[in-house]
Amino acid sequence: MAATGVGVDQSKINLFSFTGKMKILHMSWLAFFISFMVWFNFAPLLASIRETFGLSDQEVKLLLILNVSLTIPARIIIGMLVDKYGPKITFSVLLGLGSIVCFLFAFAETYTELATYRFLLGFVGAGFVIGIRLVSEWFPAKQVGTAEGIYGGWGNFGSAGAAILLPTLAAWIGGDDGWRWAVATTGFLALGFSVVFYFSVSNNPKGTTYFRPKNLGAMEVTSKGDFFLYCAMTAPLYLALGTLAWKVGPANLDIFSANITWMIYAALFVLYAYQVSNIYKINKGLFAANARPVPEIHRYKFKQVAALNFSYMITFGAELAVISMLPLFFFDTFKDSANLSVAEAALIASIFAGLNIVMRPMGGYWSDKFGRKLVLSITLIGAAVGFFLMSQITPDWSIPAAVGVMVIAAVFVNAGNGAVFAVVPLVKRRLTGGVAGTTGAFGNVGGVTFLTVLSFVSSDTFFMVISAAAFAIFLLVMLLLEEPKGFMYEQNEDGSIEKINLH
């Protein structure tokens, strides 16, 4: 049995280093940063886009929902592809293709084009999953929470970067097309960096093995109970997409006819059935008449994945929904009582996502230091309190007070993101992309769910719903999640077993 760690740099994390594992970390978060700038390049410019196209409130809300919808299946697909083909080529291709769609969105002429390209740009949001696998290959378990937190926090700052830079850039360019060229700028960044990334990284350190799954199409599980739980946990991904179809159907926005809406429902049902058949195909050995239990050293508990899925549905799902609506929320709330401008509202809202640069790494660091289950539980409770306080904001509040309670919610949500992905790489190494993809997809399920809630309720009720959901998931985590400890094991191609330390 081979010991893990051969070729893996065990030195401390030095953020001022640009060699070895630190070079990989910096290239990873930069790729993630750019992908998030592309993904959220329209949110701070919504006021200008609304004016250009003469959009109704429902059309604006549909764009917000479309932006996070395709990312649900995309993160599943990208997670499997990165496990199979490696982060280097997967991230490069994703950024290159994303830049093309970004250009199409920037110069759309009709609302149909605008909505279509916004929907397709949701695929760029799957880039996050790629870096999770890449960083986990280069950092030991005792540092992986901190490293993943830095990757996620600094990369996630791309949405805040878009909120800070793009309105100013659009104003500097000026004219009715200022917002278009600001959006296109992010596409040029993505295209250029796709080339730089490809020639700057490698999938894993020299002397280590890049463990790949045996099959592509679904994750392996190690017990019959986990098979059924996996099937059940796949259903919300399709239900979220069904919710979108319902939202644009005749019962709501009436963009799709009843026939088209029902066709979408049927297609989603067929896709879910097909996914379940794939899960069975890959795991049918568990149900064979002569099936033997999976050896203990190769087992993992899918309830760990389920707990992480629901946790990220709250932490990142709430963040997705909130940062999408927050610029307009502050503008509409304080435009009369405090004469707040669109640019000022976008700048204030950028603080929420901007705190990722500090709090997501801290969530990962605290998880490495104090325990992963404990830190995740505390962040969920803190998020519940923070969003309850946000539900109380009115135009009568002072802007500093409103920003203060927003910061409380943002601190715990962003730290929670880091705490979730401090656990993800420690579930099963060769399935890290798949676990990260599923967990990431549930973040988008949360985004779609909460934005759909927002389309029917006031902002104070919207924040209250997130608060209640955070408390419910805290209880679920206490019940399901187990602290990673000991070792996990992977099999090399030559049949030897490699021990991977979880401490």
Image (spheres, rainbow, N blue to C red):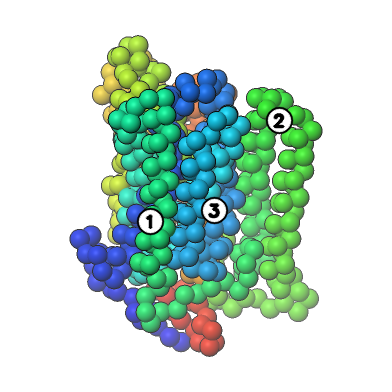
Q: Measuring from the top left, give residue 198's x and y in whole percent.
A: 41, 65
Q: CA distance from mark 3 to mark 1?
A: 21 Å
Q: Amino acid at mark 3?
A: Arg
Give the mark count.
3
Amino acid carrying mark 2 in the image? Phe
Drawn side of residue 279 relative to residue 70, left or right: right
Q: Residue 227: x and y, percent?
A: 66, 62
Q: Nearer the viewer, mark 3 or mark 1?
A: 1
Give the residue at x 49% y 27%.
462
Q: Going 67% across and 35% down the picture, which residue do you hit?
A: 245
Residue type beneath disc 1: Phe
Which tag is nearer the camera, tag 2 or tag 3?
2
State the CA–CA distance, disc 2 to disc 3.
26 Å
Q: Which residue is mark 2?
A: 256
Determine the residue positioned at 31% across, 59% down: 26
Q: Secondary structure at mark 3?
A: helix
Tag 2, which secondary structure?
Answer: loop
Q: Residue furthest top?
A: 336
Please indicate whether residue 303 sits to the left or right of residue 291 in the image: left
User: Camera-side residue: 490 or 370?
Assistant: 490
User: Compared to 156, does 67 lie above or below?
Assistant: above
Q: Between residue 244 and residue 121, name the one nearer to us.
A: 121
Can residue 456 be seen here?
yes
Query: Which one is in front in this view, the residue at disc 2 or the one at disc 1?
Result: 1
Return the residue at label 1: 193
Determine whether 469 is above or below 369 in the image: above
Q: Which residue is mark 3?
A: 75
Image coords of residue 206 (percent x, y): 37, 79
